[in-house]
Image (spheres, rainbow, N blue to C red):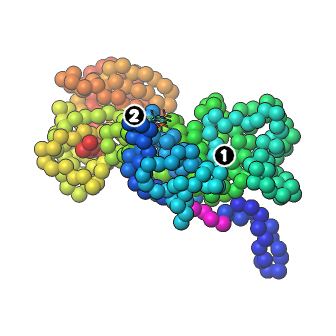
Amino acid sequence: WGNSFDRAGGRTLLRRAVPAGMISIRIQKLTKRFGLVTALHDLDLTIEPGELFFLLGPSGCGKTTLLRSLAGFYFPEEGTIFFGGDDVTRLAPHKRNTGMMFQSYALWPHMTVAENVAFGLEERKVARDELKRRVGEALESVRMGSYAERKPNQLSGGQQQRVALARALVVRPRCLLLDEPLSNLDAKLRLEMRAEIRRVCKEFALTTVYVTHDQKEALSVSDRMAILDGGCIRQVGTAREVYRRPACKLVANFIGETDFLEGKVVSAERGGAVVETALGRFHGVLGDLTRVPTAGARVTLSVRPECWTLSRETPERNGVKGRIGACVYLGETAQYDFVAAGGGQTLKIFELNPRFTEQADRGEWFASAAPEDVVVLTE
Ligand code: ATP
């Protein structure tokens, strides 16, 4: 970003410009090995210009390795990384012009806030006046303008994190790489800072790659996300796509909670399937539209706990007969263990605005789910 001068109607306007080179990040056939361990396996991914993109997945899936490969701390054995049109695969970190904010990137305690932010510019030998102006701007952009002369130990955790963000932004990066940037903060600050990070990324139109273990962080602020497993990407999509239409069991299990039902396909067509399970016959939608199962194929159904509806009457379809076992009342929601008739399986059911908790242990109930909430998974 930066201040640029526009001529408009004879007046010179000072405006904060979008970075000249808003870039895409293209990763092609990337493989990274550590000895016998393949941390990234033939990985393809394109992150669009200005996108806030999250990397998620179980521990050891390769998130940090991918982020560090983008930063230039690791060189891959195979494959290519493009920042816009530039091949940066073998470029040293300081030549990539990325802004970085890592969990362990502490501020220097002996320097003031302004000095901490200025450091990257001094290394780049930016002239004094410009340096001062840019530090001021970066601090303003994270609402820390009035803290320039403080030392880090005179700041709260959230304020320190804002300074770290200003430090990443001040070098006018082409993209921002964030590795668990909020994991040291308490829950309230995390909420505040995740909104702040999104605001800053969008204001400066920065292509941003963000690694986190916190699903809520990813669901709430991402444009899109990738779920990795064993060095491979299992699904890429928006929060809604990944949550509502997981492509495989791993993703369904990793993001949010879910009930799995095993079954056999009766018929499948046009994005949906009818599946026979031990709890009855279900109509559902395919998680992966490119893989239509054949009749007789073994599949798994994924139903989110909040997608079940409890009733006393037999539902038209997609119903399971049973009784309500344990019930936890949480005010705005209740969580039930629903024991399916026959005792074969217990389903987890969440009810928003709970009405049934008092009658929970009495008699026969039905749980049902709409076909669009039943996702048929082939792997
Ligand atoms: P976490 O969520 O636990 O931080 P991650 O998804 O970031 O995990 P990575 O740190 O990228 O996972 O690790 C991917 C795989 O590569 C793991 O099997 C890990 O043990 C291995 N690995 C990572 N760094 C090294 C290294 N420097 N030397 C050897 N193996 C490594």
Q: In which quarter of the image is residue 243?
A: top left
Q: Residue 355 colored magenta?
A: no
**Measured from the top left, where is residue 82 in percent x and y?**
51, 59
Residue at 41% x, 27% y: name it: 335
Of label 1 and label 2, which has the lower sequence position?
Answer: 1
**Measured from the top left, where is residue 345 in percent x and y?**
25, 26
Q: Is the magenta stretch mostly helix, strand or loop?
A: loop
- Tag 2, which secondary structure? loop
Q: Give the range drawn in magenta.
A: 20-25
- Tag 1, which secondary structure? helix
Q: Name the residue under label 1.
A: 196
Q: Is residue 209 above or below residue 255?
A: below
Most foreground residue, 310 or 266: 266
Quadrant occupied by the N terminus? bottom right
Question: Does the Cβ of the disc 1 residue fall within 8 Å of ligand 1?
Answer: no
Q: Is residue 283 left or right of residue 158?
A: left
Most foreground residue, 297 or 123: 123
Q: In this view, does 207 lie to the left or right of 144?
A: left
Label 1 crowd (10 A; few <14 / some 14-19 / many >=20) = some
Q: Which residue lies furthest to the front in this view?
A: 35
**Measured from the top left, where is residue 190 in percent x and y?**
62, 36
Residue at 86% x, 55% y: name it: 128
Residue at 12% x, 44% y: name it: 296
Q: How far apart are marks 1 and 2 (CA)?
A: 27 Å
Q: How many labels does the image show?
A: 2
Q: Is residue 25 above or below residue 375?
A: below
Quadrant occupied by the C terminus? top left
Residue at 17% x, 32% y: name it: 278
Disc assigned to residue 257: 2
**Measured from the top left, where is residue 377 in percent x and y?**
27, 43
